Amino acid sequence: MAGDRMRNKAQPGHPADPSAPAAHLPVLFAQVMDGLRVVEDGRYLDGTFGRGGHARGVLERLGPGGRLLLMDKDPEAIAEAERSFGGDARVSIRRGSFASLGSWEQARELDGLLFDLGVSSPQLDVAERGFSFGKDGPLDMRMDPESGESAAQWLAHADEREIADVLWTYGEERQSRRIARGIVARRAQEPLARTAQLADLIGSIVPRGKDKSHPATRSFQAIRIHINRELADLETGLDAALAALKPGGRLAVISFHSLEDRIVKQFIARHAKAPPANRRMPQLQDFVPVLADVGGGAIRADDAELVANPRSRSAVLRVAEKLDADGRKAA
């Protein structure tokens, strides 16, 4: 799971925490804090702890009676959560995907819930995790390196059509078939075990585009999404989040990919707006909204953040509020 796309420059207005690396902030920090509307005695869950930038901001706004639940399936993120917040009685920590939050007994009647999707900066920056084609390392890409098969293992057995389908569906890679054919041909000669091997192979098949991005960008993204079941987990997690929120509770989701954002956007719309009427079918019951879009649609980084943190350019935040049983905002 992801957590934070961090920047190394402190922002005005962020409360200092002498026990933590305060110089690091995640993307859209102020917008997330505004969206969650943290109250002192509230109950909140960060489903993608990462390195704790958003979590620290929530905790600084909580009083003695508040609660903060932290989740991540990356063991290194959980280790960081234990180091930073393990001694705080207001904090509970659980290792696992946010898709499983429905089974966490403490995750009930929440005032706010955050998902920060994708890959965190620490995951990208450590070559051994295998997420980046810019740093040679084992071809892994698992957010939980102790669970499931790695990218190398999948590429070793997946057939050409499956590889092409993944590259097209999750990466919108136009050269998906050519790349898949090249992968299958190369693995017959030698195993694809390193990120540099795969990146060089794709670079030899696909010419560099006008935007100057590396030819392997879309393919690496697609394989990572597939290996980690990111879109399926997102759909499950959103349903679980809605059930866990109390009326008036806020859901905030940051996405970095159009497929993720589309899922979030459609989820909010499905629960906030009545479906189009079909004149040929009888209307069985009146639609009662369950969510309200309180963020006004997509929220993006401002110019100052874009300069300080180029990784924020693709970040999109959406915020929704759970309504009461009558479809009204909670008092």
Image (cartoon, rainbow, N blue to C red):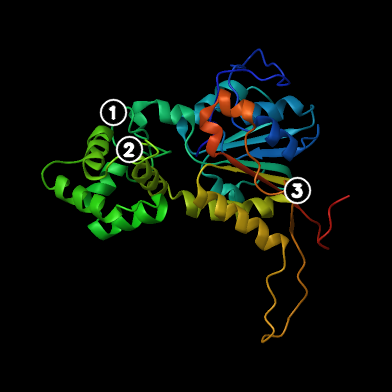
- Residue 192 image-quadrant placement: top left
Q: Compare residues 86 and 295 and report the one nearer the observer.
A: 295
Badge 1 amino acid: Asp
**At x 40% / y 52%, what residue is drawn?**
172
Query: Residue 240: x percent and y percent?
Result: 62, 53
Relative height, residue 21 to residue 202 (above, below): above
Mark 3, residue position: 294
Query: Residue 159: x percent and y percent?
Result: 23, 57
Mark 1, residue position: 136
In the picture as drawn, the residue positioned furthest to the left comes out as 189
Badge 3 amino acid: Val
**At x 79% / y 55%, what residue is drawn?**
323
Secondary structure at badge 1 equals loop
Q: CA distance from mark 1 to mark 2?
A: 11 Å
Q: Are marks 3 and 2 in contact (CB under 8 Å)?
A: no
Secondary structure at badge 2 equals loop
Residue 140 is tagged as 2
**At x 76% / y 29%, what residue is drawn?**
62
Q: Compare residues 71 and 273 and report the one nearer the observer.
A: 273
Name the mark nearer the viewer: 1 or 2: 1
Badge 2 amino acid: Asp
Mark 2 Cα-neighbour bin, 10 Å: few <14, some 14–19, many ≥20: many
- Side of 74 where 36 appears, left or right: right
